[in-house]
Image (cartoon, helix red, strand yellow):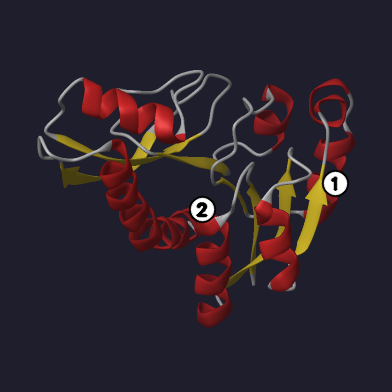
Amino acid sequence: MKRIIIFASGSGTNAENIIKYFQKLKTAEVTHVFSNNQRAKVLRRAHDLKVKALHFDRASFYDTNEVLNILKDAQPDLIVLAGFLWIFPKKIIDVFPDQVINIHPALLPKYGGKGMYGHHVHEAVVRNQEKESGITIHYVNEHYDEGAIIFQAKTAITEEDTPEDVANAIHQLEYKHFPVVIEKVLALNEE
């Protein structure tokens, strides 16, 4: 069975959706959820779904090899960033080449980069009167939101839409597509 590790910083609805998807499918399993936020709801969601949940701090992620060594021991087939807000260290990317993917709540290259996450993205999209937004699933490199794009899905935006309306539409795209794309990436990595 393929092994997935999720990194998340917040509430963890995407993480929960991915865990449940693979619990039903049984081709892969989420073995761990890592969070840089000890109060993140994602840790409780993982625990409730019988997935190991770990919190780490900045030093163990960037300054030491503590997180890297745990990852090496866990031997993931794929590392999935689902609302993870820190830039991923090159030392981890180098050990897991083409095995780290992220989801971004906009159509990259628009609305990417440092500070562009969650409601910040949706507010900017509405403020700039965009006609569409969407999700981008991409490989992770050492720069925010600049890795090769794997998949994008779009949703139309009307003049009446609020940032909350856009957020709701984006969440629906995430829940529908993210697990399926993860499954496809795992199959690609087999070849």
Q: Nearer the viewer, residue 161 or 31?
A: 161
* Circle number at residue 70: 1
Which residue is at a point 52% across and 81% down the rendered structure image? 24
Say few, some or many: other residues with alpha carbon within 10 Å of mark 2 (under 14 / 14 to 19 / 20 or more).
few
Q: Amino acid at mark 1?
A: Ile
Residue 87: where, in percent of width, then height?
62, 25
* Circle number at residue 189: 2
| Left or right of 149 on screen, residue 42 | right
Residue 152 visible here:
no
Q: Quadrant of residue 152?
A: top left
Q: Amino acid at mark 2?
A: Asn
Q: How many marks?
A: 2
Is 110 located above or below residue 176 in the figure?
above
Say few, some or many: other residues with alpha carbon within 10 Å of mark 1 (under 14 / 14 to 19 / 20 or more).
few
Q: Quadrant of residue 8?
A: top right
Which marked residue is nearer to the observer: mark 2 or mark 1? 1
Is 153 located above or below residue 148 in the figure?
below
Residue 136 visible here:
yes
Q: CA distance from mark 2 to mark 1?
A: 21 Å
Disc 2 or 1, which lies upstream in sequence?
1
| Left or right of 6 on screen, residue 121 | left
| Left or right of 181 on screen, residue 21 | right
Which residue is at a point 32% across and 43% down the rendered structure image? 164
Is 31 located above or below residue 23 in the figure?
above
